[in-house]
Every structure is written in C-alpha cells, then in structure tokens.
Amino acid sequence: MELIDGKATATAIKAEIKQEVERMVAEGGKRPHLAAILVGHDGGSETYVNNKVRACEECGFQSTLLRFEDDITEAQLLTEVRQLNEDATVDGFIVQLPLPRHIDEQKVIEAIDPHKDVDGFHPINVGRMAIGLPAFISATPKGILELLRRYHVETKGKKCVILGRSNIVGKPMAQLMMQKSGGDSTVTVCHSHSPQLKDECRQADIIIAAIGRPAFVTADMIKPGVVVIDVGTTRVPDATRSRGWRLQGDVDFDAVAPLCSAITPVPGGVGPMTICMLMQNTLAAAKHLYR
Ligand code: NAP
C-alpha cells in the first residue's frame, strides 16, 4: 500500500510556484496578488483564511485580507466584491464561505468577475470546466486530480466511484474524472439516495469519498487493490488530544488502507492540496491564462 502524501506534494508545488513567481519578478513583472474577504468570526473560516494567507507568503504572493463583521449587509458586501473586481492590483480573490444567513451566497459568487474567481465557483468557470475549456477549477477536485497524476495512478478506462455530489467537490470531481483530457475514467456518482452504493464501491478501481460521514467507507465496501481518496474532514471528539477533537475522514483508514494499492490519509492528504491549488489558480490569474 502506498500512502499518497498530500502535504509533501503541496510543499513541492508551492516551491515550484515560488520559483516561477521569482522568475516573473526578476523579469520585471509584479507579484501575484490574492485578496480574501472574511465575514464574521467563525473559527473554521478564520483558520482556513489564515492558512491561505500563510500559503501566499510561502509562494511569494502579495495577499490582502478584508475583514467584516457578520452584520455587514448583502448590498455592502456586493459593493466590496465589485471594488475588488475593479482593482487592477488584485489578480484574484475569494469570499470565504459560509456567509451569514442573511446574505445570498450564490448572488455573491455570481458578482465575482469570472477572471478573478480563483475559487472556480462562478457558473462561467463551472460551465467552461464542464465542457473542457480552460477555466479556474474548484481547488479540492483540482488538487485530487493533481495528486493522482503525481502519484502516477492510472485513471484512463478505470471505474471511478465518487461519493457525494456537492457543487464544490462531488460534481466538479465527476466532470474532471470523466473528461478525456482529465481522468478519462468511467464515473459513477453516489449520494444519500443511491441504493446500490456499497455494490458500486465494490466494483470501483478508484473511490473518491466526499460526504462528511466519518469512517463511512469500510473494508467490506472495497475491492482489493483499489485507490482511495478521502476528502472528508469531520471533527470528532478525542479525549487523547489536548484540543479535545481530531479530524476524521470518510474512510475507516485502519481497516481499509491494508487492502488498497494507494490511499490518502486525513489529515495530510487532500487538505493541503486544496490551498495549494488556490495558489496555482492565483498564479494563473496573474498570468491572465484564462482570458
Ligand atoms: P456537502 O455539501 O455536505 O455534500 C455532501 C454530499 O454527500 C451530498 O451530496 C450528500 O448527498 C452526500 N451524502 C451525505 N451523507 C451520505 C450518505 N450517508 N450516503 C451517501 N451520500 C451521502 O459536503 P462537501 O462540501 O462536498 O464536503 C464533503 C466532505 O469533504 C466534508 O467532510 C468536508 O469537510 C470535506 N471537504 C474537505 C475539503 C478539503 O480540502 N480537505 C474540501 C471540501 C470539503 P445528497 O446530495 O443526497 O444530500
């Protein structure tokens, strides 16, 4: 069994990005600039945004964090988005989700200039990706494809089962794995109303689990030699940790790993790749690659 090390891969990719940035700067170009909007004080969102700012430093990017209290109105937030759209010094930006309930997230996503939409959530980017055109691709599925490539996992003609159909992971993952220029796999997507989910998994060469149900994928659900990508990150109570919890994936790792040809751990698998792909998207925005 091979452990797919997302942390090491992400470190290597960030070093590649930094090298490219220093080359651009040495040639008289400007540093890529990522801005992030953070609304409120949700602990998880603060951590994610801080990690993104730190990744910018590692890659040699400029970063700007715009913070607002959670009583900001939808209209005010839309104004901030439009200002970032117009700001020529900013190459790409993200609005950290989730937003407070009184703000329509979809409206905010659709207000972002698709050319600066480095999260790849705007319908223009989602649509372009779906038909195989160059586009900003949602960071988690993009990172998974990159991990499969860097670990030389054969995907062409393989049966890939994706658990979960969210807009940010399951659906784009299915598109990418299906595409000729992507995974070129035969893809099955399962969700909470899929009666044959276990049988589908047992036939899979590659399983990508993104449902947010701790240890859902068990040893009886897999074919020996399968490649398992675990996207799930759920905080479960753990009295042995000083903080009282640990991150648990969607896969029962200890029981499943010995049967796999390759598997990602949680943490240290998909997670580090996600932020790294946001950096790659920002570099692409700075180079105007998708314009
Ligand atoms: P989500 O929006 O909650 O979607 C969950 C999907 O799983 C839905 O399609 C749902 O089906 C399906 N599902 C839920 N319970 C199921 C069950 N018992 N059997 C079959 N399908 C089931 O979640 P998400 O945003 O995609 O995230 C999924 C997990 O990945 C979460 O743990 C999240 O924290 C993690 N995540 C990690 C990263 C990372 O960077 N590591 C990034 C994003 C997400 P229905 O559509 O039928 O409801």
Image (spheres, rainbow, N blue to C red):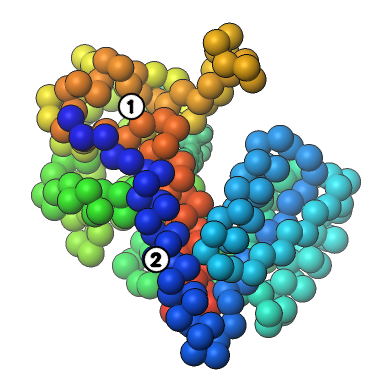
Q: Residue at x 51, y 25 (%)?
A: 247
User: At x 68% / y 59%, what residue is drawn?
Assistant: 36
Any part of residue 221 in sight: no
x and y, in percent, of residue 97 in the image: 65, 47
Q: Secondary structure at mark 1?
A: loop
Position of residue 188 in the picture relative to residue 63 (left or right): left
* Residue 116 in the image: above or below residue 9: below
**In the displayed structure, would residue 62 be above or below residue 227?**
below
| Residue 177 position within the rendered picture, expressed as x and y whole percent measured from the top left | 26, 51
Name the amino acid, label 1.
Ser
In this view, the residue farthest toward the top is 239
Residue 281 got which mark?
none
Q: Name the kind of residue labelled 2 in the image.
A: Glu
Residue at image position (32%, 67%) is: 132
Q: Is mark 1 within 8 Å of ligand 1?
A: yes
Counting other residues with Cα less than 10 Å from the Cα at mark 2, is it few (<14), some (14-19), or many (20 or more)? Answer: few
Mark 1 = which residue? 194
Tell me which label, 2 or 1, sits earlier in the chain. Answer: 2
Ligand 1: does it lie within 8 Å of the C-beta at label 2?
Answer: no
The local crowd at label 1, few if under 14, some if 14 to 19, many if 20 or more residues have their Cα within 10 Å, is few
Q: Nearer the viewer, residue 57 or 47?
A: 57
Image coordinates of residue 32 in percent, x first then y, are 57, 74
Residue positioned 74% across, 51% down in the render? 38
Quarter placement of the N terminus? top left
**Nearer the observer, 114 or 43:** 43
249 on left or right of 4: right
Distance in Å between CA atoms under marks 2 and 1: 41 Å
Spot the residue most to the bottom: 28
Q: Which mark is residue 16?
A: 2
Q: Nearer the viewer, residue 246 or 106?
A: 246
Instruction: Write down the quadrant of residue 54 in the picture.
Output: bottom right
Where is 119 relative to 241, above or below? Answer: below
